[in-house]
Image (spheres, rainbow, N blue to C red):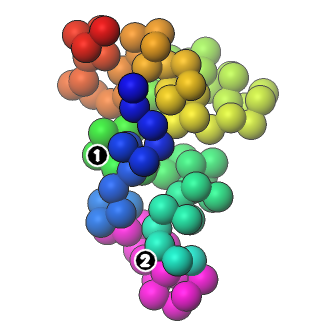
Amino acid sequence: MLDIYSLYEDSYYLAKNPDVEQAVAAGSFTNGFEHFLYFGQYEGRNPGPFFDTQFYLEIYPEIADIVSNTGISPIQHFIEYGQFEGRDPFFDFFTDFYL
């Protein structure tokens, strides 16, 4: 079972989000994960190479509706429901293969 910690990669997140890297360097956040947990996941930022927020919302448009109506983030949806429903977290990953 995947969780938010297994899908997050700090070096990836900071490299893809230089504004967050600067905020961490300035001491506004302890690390990139803190930013992702409180802000990034709701801003559509990818936590690492194994979860693509845009892909997830595009391939499953009904989840985009759930996200906008409930406030749950796309990655939260995947962790709580999507992985168990056989939904893929990024292009070229086939969840059904592992179920």
Q: Residue at x 29, y 46 (%)?
A: 49
Which residue lies under the disc numbered 1?
A: 49
Which quadrant of the view contains residue 76?
A: top right
**Residue 30 can be seen in this image:** yes
Amino acid carrying label 2: it is Glu
Q: Main secondary structure of the magenta part?
A: helix
Residue 13 image position (x, y, % from top left): 38, 61
The quadrant the N terminus occupies is top left
Circles 2 and 1, Cβ within 8 Å, touching? The answer is no
Circle 1 Cα neighbour tier, 10 Å, few/some/many (<14 / 14–19 / ≥20): few
Q: Label for residue 97?
A: none
Q: Residue furthest front?
A: 1
Above or below 88: residue 10:
below
Residue 78 image position (x, y, % from top left): 50, 27
Q: Label for residue 21?
A: 2
Q: Residue at x 63, y 48 (%)?
A: 42
Above or below 45: residue 89:
above
| First in residue order: circle 2 vs circle 1 | 2
Residue 36 image position (x, y, % from top left): 53, 58
Q: Residue at x 50, y 29 (%)?
A: 79
Magenta stretch, residue numbers: 14-28
Q: Mark 2 to mark 1: distance in Å?
A: 17 Å
**SS for tag 2?**
helix
